[in-house]
Image (spheres, grey):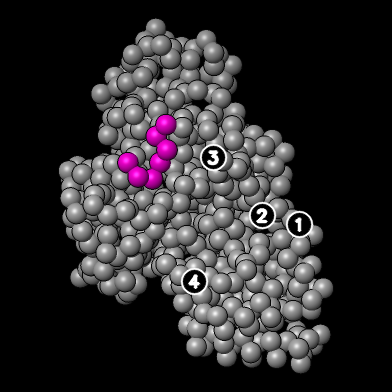
Amino acid sequence: MKETKVSWLEWSKESFKKAQELDKPILLGISAVWCHWCHVMDQTTYSDSEVARLIEKNFVPIRVDRDRRPDIDKRYNMGGWPSTVFLTPDGDVLTGGTYIPSTQMTSLLDYVSQLYQKNKGTFESKIKDLKQEMQKPSAEFVSDLGNFQSVIEKLTLNIATRFDSVNGGFGDSPKFPHSEALRLALLQHSLQKHKAALNIVTKTLIAMGSGGIHDREEGGFFRYSTSRDWSIPHYEKMCEDNAKLLFNYLEAYQVTGDETFRGIANGILSYISNKLSDQEEGGFYGSQDADEVYYKLTLKERKKRTAPRIDQTLFVNWNAMMISAYLFASVVLEEKAYREFAIKTVDLLMGKAFSPKKGMNHYYLTENGSYLSGLLTDQAYMVRCLIDCYQVTSDRKFLKKAENLAVFMLDTLGDDAGGFYDKPKDMAAFGALKLLDKPLEENSVAIDALLRLYHLTSKEAYLETAKKTLEFFTSSYQQYGITGAVYGLAVEMYLHPMQIHIVGSLEEVITSRFRSESLKAYNPLKVVETFDPVLDHDRLETLGYPVTETPKAYVCFKGKCNSIKDPENIAKFIRL
């Protein structure tokens, strides 16, 4: 395999200083270990002697991995991967594109070099335009339940409009799973009894499960389909996508009881356990590379070939997603091994990638430690993951850790105007990294986590911040199309939360049965908490629950609470 002849530098103070001292523009290459066309560009364009000569002569080349540096990718991506971005020595964008063949690259390198030399000092900063785009003010919004309900109606209509009734999924090719849109549609079926919404979910999940996007030999799903009918996948497998799809198939199984969905969920779990995790130490790996030839072979034939490379980086946000998915699998499928591995991974990450002063780092390498602190994506997903750990285990250490991380997130990333920034403020950063963004997905996850913390602690500050963040995005969520469904899920958590309080000794079998039956029943808007009469005496007094000889559960929804004595009966009060 031909390797790139370009001497890539890291994104660092030294690299920018070099560009400034040499007065040369920067060639920023944004790549990914799993990205097929990134590999092709390395083996062709960047391995071309003339291309390499021109880059070395006239540019300062910097290479960034989009998984490890989502903050840079967010600000400089040119519409896909690879992204080929030409910058001034100060980090301003001159021009750029995605994949560029070597014949075009030589001409482009000459053009950009001459453009820079002739016009340096006269470029208008595109960063100013980017700043305006990233920091658009939110329109005034008077919140009430009716306005928030209209958000759900608009998102649901968008999902229905975009639905491909022939092939399942949404839109034309390339076709992505859009897991959050499927989750919101399933929730609307359960809340509003929309049969059409259920059809959207089941048709899509069955079509994906029987299509080429699903690896039926080794399990798991590829990132997306290049064809409208799901038959031709793009062959990389991502931790993030499989975590989200695991939720989809498990929830569909909860609602329908269809064993097909359970089987596909088991296949995802098998793939992750066998290939994309460190079963000894804990942790989920980032991705597995694309290899079209390998994935077209049968399992027997595959064993004769070297499997595609696995990126063993542990990304905290993706690990948190998969931990939550494994905990969910442990209760829906009644398999303790998934819970044990999830807890092992949480303990690993909190031990290796957490700092009280800097929050969660973004990624962890077994040999080299953890890196890049304070990104919203890692804080938000980890807070929610720790809440899931608390609900499943009733161990208050997880609730305490979730609160500590939430406070860090509020103090470091929160904005008084509403919403959370994607990274801490850093005026010493280079180029567009000086700018701050408020991403919808991570803010929606933060909202969900804060609402759950409010229900678990009764602390009004969590509710107020969550509501203010919800309001901040009411004027902009529609521009995200169906990817705005993640915001819809947060809105529903605000509108229709269900609290399940179990009162009983943690040692009692009935208490455990109440908890397992509560967790197993479909309702993504539920918050489950177990109170020990001795350990949680003060909280029980505050909530007003009596202590009885035998454990009892209370299900509170839409202003009404039901008292339940038998664990066998609790599911019917929980299921939407």
Comparing labels 3 and 4, the label whose residue is closer to the camera: 4
- Is there a contact, CB below 8 Å, between mark 1 and mark 4? no
Q: Which residue is mark 1?
A: 426
- Which numbered dot is residue 412? none
Quarter of the image for residue 87 reads: bottom right
Rounded to the nearest angstrom, the CA distance separating label 1 from label 3 is 28 Å
Give the answer, above or below, for where 274 lies relative to 389: below
- Is there a contact, CB below 8 Å, between mark 2 and mark 1? yes
Comparing labels 1 and 4, the label whose residue is closer to the camera: 4
Comparing labels 2 and 3, the label whose residue is closer to the camera: 3
Rounded to the nearest angstrom, the CA distance separating label 3 from label 4 is 27 Å
**Which secondary structure, mark 3?**
loop
Mark toward the start of the polypeptide (1 vs 4)? 4
Is residue 311 something that shows in the picture?
yes
Is residue 388 something that shows in the picture?
no
Asked if residue 146 lies in the magenta stretch, the reply is no
Q: Which residue is mark 3?
A: 366
**Which secondary structure, mark 4?**
helix
- Is there a contact, CB below 8 Å, between mark 4 and mark 2? no
**Which secondary structure, mark 2?**
loop
Q: Report whether 559 appears left or right of 453.
A: left
What type is the residue that disc 2 sits on?
Lys
Q: State the extent of the magenta-drawn residues as a range.
A: 274-280
Image position, residue 507 (x, y; %): 41, 11
